[in-house]
Every structure is written in C-alpha cells, then in structure tokens.
C-alpha cells in the first residue's frame, strides 16, 4: 500500500506527515474497529512506523536525485526515474512531496489551502513574496489536484482542506485514508474566487 501526500508547496504536507505515526497510534488505539480491511480491493494499513514515511524533498537533496539546478528559483529539477527506483527500494507507505502524485500510488491525498493563507504560510517559512504569490495562484487554479486526478483517477483521490485545520487534524484525516475510513473526494474545494 502506498499513499502519496501531495499538494502545492505550503499546504502543510511535511508538517502533517511528520505527525502521522503519533496520530496513527492515537487513532488506532482509540478505535478498536480500525483493523486491516480492504477498500476497492486494496488492503489498508494496520501499522505505521517512522520508516514508513518518506519525505521525498529531503531524499532528493540527500541522495542528489536531480538532473539540474534552477538558480533563479532556488530549486532543483528532480530526476523522476531515479526517484521512482529509490522509492520502490525503500517501499514507504506514505510519500510526502508536491511530486508524489507523479509516482505510482494506491491512494493520493491532495492537501489544499486557501490561497491567501497559503501565501502567508510560505512567507512565514521564509519564501520570497514572488514564490508565495506564484504558489497561491497555482493553488487557486487546482493545478496539482487536476494532475492527480488525471494520473490516478477520481476514485483514488482524497482532497483535504487544511485552511482551518491544525497539522494534527490534517494528520488524523490522512490516517482515515490509510485505514480505509474515508471515501475518495475530489473537486470539493473551490478557491477560484482568489483569482477575481
Ligand atoms: P509543505 O511541506 O506542503 O510545503 P510545510 O509543512 O513545510 O508545507 O508547511 C509550510 C508552512 O506552513 C510552515 O511554516 C508550517 O509551519 C506551516 N503550516 C503547516 N501546516 C499548517 C497548518 N495546518 N496550519 C497552519 N500552518 C501550517
Ligand atoms: Mg514539504
């Protein structure tokens, strides 16, 4: 079972997935009805350790899995083939990255955030105003959601609006996807008003 956690930079993927192991334990202990079931013929997850969570952007840096460096954007161009084989070898359950939906996955979680709040979060993280604005526009245009649905189909995509949720709340909702307690949902979020 592999769950991709994707979304525009700043939606809180790394923060929420870092909280996942603790929240998984808390949820599964609290709810004895949560056990390995199958959803759409896919087995769900009944255990989770830190090794099961892969923060892809750290891996890209530490293993130099890029083909080019974009000096202007202060970013790298990931080597997707190399990334896919490293992820296959490590076989994590959860892959955290804005690129995660470009890799094979059983379920795809797309984290969403209202664009003004997204820009605020990115500025708070120390990103340049221009980069924050670009990402806010991309979020309003549903770019990553559309890519995820195109690659994986509506039946595999789970949208979670993080705008007014704490990272732990978001992690709890990702746990529900892992354990099969959540139905797929795409197109439930609408930030197009930001563009008007
Ligand atoms: P991503 O990995 O999607 O790029 P991060 O996890 O790095 O996003 O979070 C971006 C910024 O937003 C960080 O400064 C983080 O502290 C903050 N943040 C993350 N999740 C939330 C949330 N649910 N509510 C408010 N702020 C958040
Ligand atoms: Mg991140």
Image (cartoon, rainbow, N blue to C red):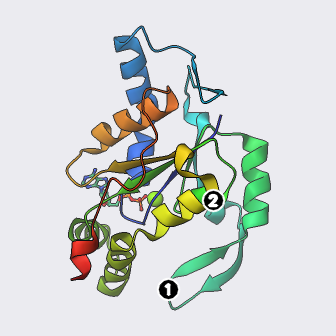
Is disc 2 in contact with disc 1, using a CB cutoff of under 8 Å? no
Measured in 3D between alpha carbons, the distance from the residue under mark 2 to the one under mark 1, in whole angstroms, is: 26 Å
Q: x, y (%) of residue 28?
A: 42, 17
The residue nearer to you, when weighing 6 against 151, is: 151
Looking at the picture, does residue 17 appear above or below residue 138?
above
Q: x, y (%) of residue 195?
A: 26, 81
Is 153 displayed left or right of 172 in the figure?
Answer: right
Tell me which residue sits at (55%, 65%) in the image: 147
The response on whether ligand 1 sits within 8 Å of label 1 is: no
N-terminal label among 2 and 1: 1
Figure quadrant of the N terminus: top right
Callout 1: 10 Å neighbours few (<14), some, many (20+)?
few
Image quadrant of residue 125? bottom left
User: Disc number at residue 181?
Assistant: none
Is 16 displayed left or right of 44 in the figure?
Answer: left
Disc 2 marks which residue?
Answer: 151
Tell me which residue sits at (80%, 54%) in the image: 85
The residue nearer to you, when weighing 166 against 140, is: 140
Q: x, y (%) of residue 152?
A: 61, 53
Looking at the picture, does residue 170 appear above or below residue 116?
above
| Furthest-top residue in this view | 32
Residue 57 visible in this rendered orientation of the protein: no
Figure quadrant of the C terminus: bottom left
Q: x, y (%) of residue 53?
A: 56, 40
* SS of the residue under disc 2: helix
Looking at the picture, does residue 38 appear above or below residue 169?
above
User: Disc number at residue 73?
Assistant: 1
């Amino acid at each position: 079972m592999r769950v991709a956690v994707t979304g525009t930079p700043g939606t809180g993927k790394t923060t929420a997935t870092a909280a996942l192991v603790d929240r998984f334990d808390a949820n599964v202990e609290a709810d004895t009805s949560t056990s390995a079931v199958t959803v759409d013929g896919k087995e769900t997850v009944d255990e989770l350790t830190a090794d099961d969570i892969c923060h892809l952007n750290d891996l890209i840096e530490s293993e130099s899995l890029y083909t080019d460096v974009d000096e202007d954007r202060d970013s790298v161009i990931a080597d997707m083939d190399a990334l896919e084989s490293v992820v296959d070898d490590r076989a994590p359950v959860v892959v955290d990255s804005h690129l995660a939906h470009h890799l094979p996955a059983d379920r795809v979680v797309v984290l969403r955030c209202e664009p003004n709040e997204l820009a605020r979060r990115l500025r708070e993280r120390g990103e340049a105003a221009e980069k924050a604005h670009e990402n806010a526009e991309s979020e309003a245009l549903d770019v990553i959601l559309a890519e995820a649905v195109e690659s994986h189909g509506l039946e595999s995509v789970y949208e979670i609006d993080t705008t007014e949720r704490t990272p732990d709340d978001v992690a709890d909702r990702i746990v529900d996807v892992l354990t099969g307690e959540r139905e797929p949902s795409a197109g439930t979020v609408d930030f197009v008003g930001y563009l008007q």
